Every structure is written in structure tokens, then in C-alpha cells.
Amino acid sequence: MREVNIDEEDNLSINFIDIKHIQLNDICLFLSNYIESPLFAMSNYFIEYLCQQCAYSPLDAIKLFNLAFEKRRLNNSLIKGAYKLDESYIKFIVGAYDSLTLKNVEHFTARKKLLLRFDEVLQDYKLRRTADKILDRLT
């Protein structure tokens, strides 16, 4: 993945539609490499997949989300289906936070990092308006 040039493979993409039967722990390394590649594009389907996988592998889902969230700034032109993508970010953060139910150091640390990510999201005015709407629906 790292050696692929974006010019060489213009049509290579993963849609993340109907792949919920594939467990995240089976493809976590591949997804990590895919996110690091120049071909990765953030999408609602990707975030939805990570949300679903929080029930099984919350720490891996959070790790991949954070990696993709940071990468989105670099690949802004590649974002696919940006409609309601901001809403997906917030839904993932809230859902992932709720999935961290164990009282151990790993889950505590992950919850803390999610709160920091949520704080970062709220600093963006556009994302903050979306967050207000979502939080109103959740409460």
C-alpha cells in the first residue's frame, strides 16, 4: 500500500459498504496501512464500520479512527461522501466512549483521549454546531 502512487491507481478505493461481517481484528493491520496510503479517503461508511466494530474491538476502532481523523487534514480533496461526515465524527466519538466499559487503564486512557478528540472537534465551529444537534438528540 505504501508504495502505490495515487496516479497509478486512480480507481482503487474501499467503500466499506456491507462489510460488517468482517471483524476489525482480522483486517486492522491492512486498514492501518490503507489509512497511511495516499489512496485513503475518509467516508461515512468507514466511520459507520468503525462504530459497528466498537462492540467487538473498541480500542482498535478508536486507534484507526484517530489515525484517519489526523490523515483527513492531509487528504481533504479525497474525502468521499462528505455529506454529514461531521455528524459521523461525533457519533463515532460518543459511541466509542460508550463502548469502553471496562475499568482498566487501557479503557480509562482511551476514554480520556476520546474526550480530548471531542474537545478538538468542538473547537471547529462547523463541527460544534453539528455536535450541539447530535447531543440534543442523544439526551
Image (cartoon, helix red, strand yellow):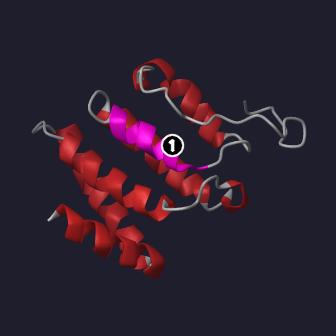
Name the dominant secondary structure of the magenta segment: helix
Q: Position of residue 109 (x, y in %)?
A: 24, 48
Q: Magenta stretch containing residue 94, yes or no?
A: no
Q: Residue 15 falls in which quadrant of the image?
A: top right
What stretch of residues is rendered in magenta? 42-53
Label 1 sits on residue? 45
Q: Residue at x 13, y 37 (%)?
A: 104
Q: Which amino acid type corresponds to the residue marked 1 in the rendered image?
A: Tyr
Q: Residue 11 falls in which quadrant of the image?
A: top right
Image quadrant containing the C terminus: bottom left
Q: Position of residue 90 (x, y in %)?
A: 36, 60
Q: Is residue 57 above or below residue 62?
A: above
Q: Residue at x 44, y 37 (%)?
A: 49
Q: Nearer the viewer, residue 50 or 113?
A: 50
Q: Position of residue 34 (x, y in %)?
A: 63, 35
Q: Residue 82 falls in which quadrant of the image?
A: bottom right
